[in-house]
Image: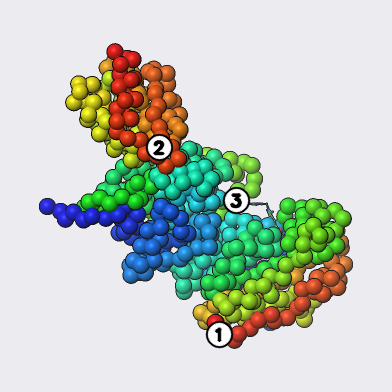
Amino acid sequence: MQKREIWKGSEAIAEAAIRAGCRCFFGYPITPQNEIPEYMSRMLPQAGGVFVQAESELAAINMVYGAAASGVRAMTSSSSPGISLKQEGISYLVGAQLPAVIVNVMRGGPGLGSIQPSQGDYYQATRGGGNGDYRTVTLAPATLQEAVDLMQDAFDIADTYRNPVMVLADGLIGQMMEPIVWQDRPGRSLPPKTWAAEGRRGRTHNNFVTSLYIGAEECEEHNLELNRKYAAMEANECRWEELMTEDAQLILVAFGTPARVAETAMRNLRQEGWNVGLLRPITLWPFPTARIRELAGKSHVKAFLDVEMNLGQMLDDVNLAVNGQRPVHFYGRCGGAVPHVSEVEQAAQKVLEEVQ
Amino acid sequence: MTVIYQKTKGLQDTPLHYCPGCGHGIVHKLIGEVLEELGLLDTTVGICPVGCAVFAGSYFSCDCIEAAHGRAPAVATGVKRTHPDQCVFTYQGDGDLASIGTAEIVHAAMRGEKITTIFINNAIYGMTGGQMAPTTLVGQRATTAPLGRDPAQAGWPIRMAEMLSTLEGLVYAERVCVVDIPRLNKAKKAIKRAFELQMAGKGFTFVEVLSPCPTNWGMEPLEANQWLMEHMAAYYPLGVVKDTGGVTG
Ligand SMILES: Cc1ncc(C[n+]2csc(CCOP(=O)(O)OP(=O)(O)O)c2C)c(N)n1
Ligand code: SF4
């Protein structure tokens, strides 16, 4: 049997990044993810990498931009208010077609908010967040095992499309301890970084990494090229997990920690004889729209209940997917509060009674 | 036939877009010449600003990265830390470096990043059409200071070379200008020393160039050079501000 080890979420994410070949980390302290920069400052130099504590999140993401532009696997992490500051850099990474991984261990907002777990940054992560018309693949782990497994994928997806990837974890994922198994995840075969500005070293042309396309037509063409990449990401990278949806009358939809709460609620309700299923998006963008739409069309499915740690953000995507075919209900806690199993059960039971 | 003068290999053949009498093009040439003379063109990454020099990456004959407004020193940090063997420089205007990017330049200097910053101080926002810069002189007119900069409202112009020189990580800072041949030669020497100290791994090096912007100053090029010497050089003294001989701390 493979060895199980107990790890703290933030440290496990950092270690997974190093194992995935991350060779530089730039960050600025913010709770609840300080263990990531702390771990990186300790371990990354030993792995032959570079750690710099930046003067701000703005500087950190621009250091990532520089390292990525020169062809190195780069990463930063932060929590909600810090991620807001990184939006400038994320937009520039997309515009200049640079791969990088950004981890957001979300806390309550808006503003300084709270330091407890939240999912209030769903819109920011899935709608672009910075200026311009863009997307970033957004991975949402629900367990520490999944968090560490997704880190390898995050770097590979970023390199495949030359686009930043966001790992969107809530504060619970960052702070809790759980057993994990370090699995050797085969990396993807990736295109060489012939575009990197790392010094010409004998190359006959200059590499110039930029997001500037000054003419309207050339900027439009650039956007259309980016759009082709988003289409490829939508076609190839969408992931979700489904439990007991085959006969479900009610499908719970949740990501991250609330998905675990929802799963327990689902199992309890099943024991009481209710046909409940769960769909857990793993990629929040691309969103499993087609699958949810398909489920909404099944005769046994009567309703959906979306559960989040916010006031209903993924709810928009669920509604777009269901497209009015079935009622979509919502239960959420916000500001740092975590939904309790009994609360989700109650909300689910109410919907189930309505649809009988 | 002997070649007396030829264009530096440090610049590409692209025609520069700068206005007549602008300092940017001259400084580009000096940087190109220095990189060529030091044999660094194959091992340099230049970080370009947002400002009139936003196209600099299409002019320098080396790899370049276009940074967000003011963030060039952070971008340079990301490159240099992961490629310590490369020569890395930032090229920044006064809005870029002394306003929106103040934190980034101060902290790059504080950390003693082994990079070189060429700071083009033209006392105005060129690209956006002549708004007040942090370096705009008291009384100098700008589109957002139509009656001239009023210290009661906008404070006093910032002397970046002096301010950064208080930081131990900075080993060399000099202020130069390019209004005539002797001063241009001096400017080139300063740029060369900055790059040499960087390549010797000494620390952060900084060259501030007082640079004319005839277009937004509303002057003829020659008049702009005269105004620069009379007014700018009076407030921003030319010469070496700090040279530790490469010793930090
Ligand atoms: C975040 C952001 N804010 C504002 C701008 C608009 N902008 C472009 S260049 C510039 C100022 C340029 O002035 P300076 O740095 O002095 O360079 P110069 O054009 O004089 O060479 C500004 C404010 C921008 N591009 N990005
Ligand atoms: S506007 Fe000023 S700084 Fe910009 S190119 Fe013209 S002269 Fe140079």
SS at badge 3: loop
Q: Which mark is residue B247?
A: 1
Element type at marker 1?
loop
On whether disc 2 and disc 1 are found on a single subunit, the reply is: no
Using the image, tell me which numbered label, if any, was put on residue A294: none
Q: Residue at x 18, y 26 (%)?
A: A271
Query: What is the distance, in whole Å, between disc 3 and disc 2 at their CAs?
Result: 38 Å
Residue under label 3: A212
* Rendered image coloring scheme: rainbow
> In the figure, B184 relative to B147: above or below?
below
- Which three-letter amino acid code belongs to the residue tagged 1? Val
Q: Which marked residue is nearer to the observer: mark 3 or mark 1?
A: 1
Mark carried by residue A309: 2
As rendered, which of A259 and A52 lies closer to the eye?
A: A259
> Does A105 sit left or right of B208 as displayed?
left
Residue B7 lies, with reference to residue B97, above or below; the image says: below
Occupied quadrant, residue B170: bottom right
